[in-house]
Amino acid sequence: MQSFDSVFNAFVTILVTIDPPGLAPLFLALTRGMTRQERQQVSIRASVIGFGVLALFAIAGSAILSVFGITLPAFRVAGGMLLFFIAFEMVFEKRQDRKEKISDVAITRDHIHNLAAFPLAIPLIAGPGAISATVLLSGSFQGWMAQVTLVGIILACLILTYLVFVLAERIDGLLGQTGRSILTRLLGVILAALAVQFVADGIKALAAS
């Protein structure tokens, strides 16, 4: 049985790496010209695909690593560094610029035919940061009950992401540029602290092995 602290930390880590508030303006930009119903269909499909990808890594993350001969502590250090880099980008507003470039390329190439799958589900929702965080957390959620809990946490995060997409217009108008900037920086600082903890735990495990 997982403690409340471990469940809460997992929820915060995954939610911060997905960054639903940061995706709201991108969702609006990508679905420009669509009706409300079309936007809802895109948001549902993107959330379902994103959940499927992250749930796969939550359940089989360790097995996927073992195929490549990578130990969990080593991945914990590498993943923690990646999460810290993402946190650095969030604090200094580099991540949003990179996401916008990714979305612009996708619009040009796919002409929004597979918009929900790319770039919304991958890599904007289930990106390298969220996948790394999920694999790292799967090491602490051992046993089928713990895995069900982790999948439930991912589901909760994706439901919140879906709700942000549905309410994107209101949220974007409510936060404004200043609000988005403050929230992104705050989330970045929290993620940086969690990333340092991942690296410290990984180094400790490597030293003990």
Image: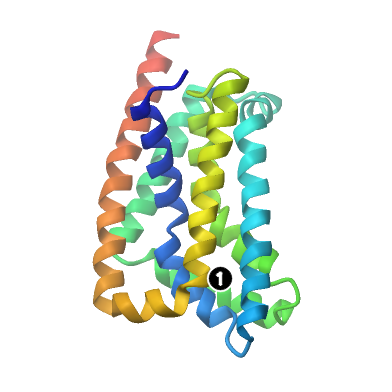
Task: Say how the picture is coloured.
Answer: rainbow
Residue at figure coordinates x 41%, y 66% from the top left = 22
* Residue farthest to the top, as pictured: 209
* Foreground of the two, 203 or 139: 139
- Residue 148 placement, left or right of 205: right
Where does residue 53 sit, x and y in percent of width and height? 66, 47
Q: Position of residue 197 (x, y in %)?
A: 31, 31
Left/right of residue 182 with respect to residue 145 in the rendered view:
left
Q: Position of residue 124 (x, y in %)?
A: 55, 61
- For the point 54% across and 31% down, which residue is it? 149
Q: Residue at x 38, y 22 (%)?
A: 3
Residue found at the far right of this picture: 113
Q: Image check: 103 left or right of 108? A: left
Q: Position of residue 15 (x, y in %)?
A: 43, 49
Foreground pick, 43 / 191? 43
Badge 1 crowding class, 10 Å Cα cut-off, few under 14, some 14 to 19, many 20 or more, is some
Amino acid type, mark 1? Ile
Q: Which residue is mark 1?
A: 102
Quadrant of residue 61 in the image? top right
In the rendered image of this protein, does residue 144 appear above or below residue 12?
above
Vertical position of residue 47 compared to residue 73: above or below: below
Which residue is at 50% across, 63% downward? Answer: 163
Q: Is residue 78 above or below residue 201?
A: below
Res. 199 in view: no
Q: Quadrant of residue 175?
A: bottom left
Instruction: Tell me how many marks there are.
Output: 1
Q: Quadrant of the C terminus?
A: top left
